[in-house]
Image: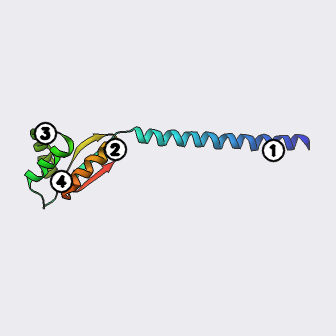
Amino acid sequence: MFLLAQHIDELVLSGTEVEKNTETKEKEEVEEAVDTPWRLILYDDDIHTFDEVISQLMKATGCSLSEAEDKTWKVHNEGKALVHEGEFEECLRIDGVLKEIQLVTEIKG
């Protein structure tokens, strides 16, 4: 009877360790997800002119006129384009600037 009680105690303790290992693994996965590069996608629309999009991209990302033109053409021709990749906070900042003129965007992680 004593051995059975001891075995049950060992199972309970090992279950606690499994829970701790699971929590640690989940925490590591969340931290890893935060560290992965985030992508800001700009979608095409029928409202904004090329000049408006180019100007806003330059304002939001600090890119050159040539780079903003290339991205704008890609959005126009393909329906969407990656306009920034990096940390979430920076994507969020750039997204806010693009949305000042109601451009359609999406942040993906």
Q: Residues within 10 Å of mark 3 (few under 14, many from 20)?
A: some
Q: Residues within 10 Å of mark 2 (few under 14, many from 20)?
A: few
Query: How far across and down, in percent of the image, does residue 20 sit?
Result: 64, 41
Asked if the residues shown at circle 4 and circle 1 are in contact, with their CB atoms under 8 angstroms apart, the answer is no
Give the number of marks.
4
Q: Residue furthest right?
A: 1
Q: Which residue is mark 1?
A: 8
Say what amino acid the circle numbered 2 marks: Glu
What separation in Å lies between label 2 and label 1 (alpha carbons)? 49 Å
Give the residue drawn at x 75%, y 44%.
12
Task: Please identify, in this view, whether the residue under mark 3 or under mark 4 is nearer the observer.
Answer: 3
What separation in Å lies between label 4 and label 2 (alpha carbons)? 25 Å
What separation in Å lies between label 4 and label 1 (alpha carbons)? 61 Å
Give the residue drawn at x 55%, y 39%.
25
Identify the secondary structure beneath mark 1: helix
Q: Which residue is mark 3?
A: 67
Sequence-earlier tag: 4 or 2: 4
Say what amino acid the circle numbered 1 marks: Ile
Sequence-earlier tag: 3 or 1: 1
Q: Which residue is mark 4?
A: 79
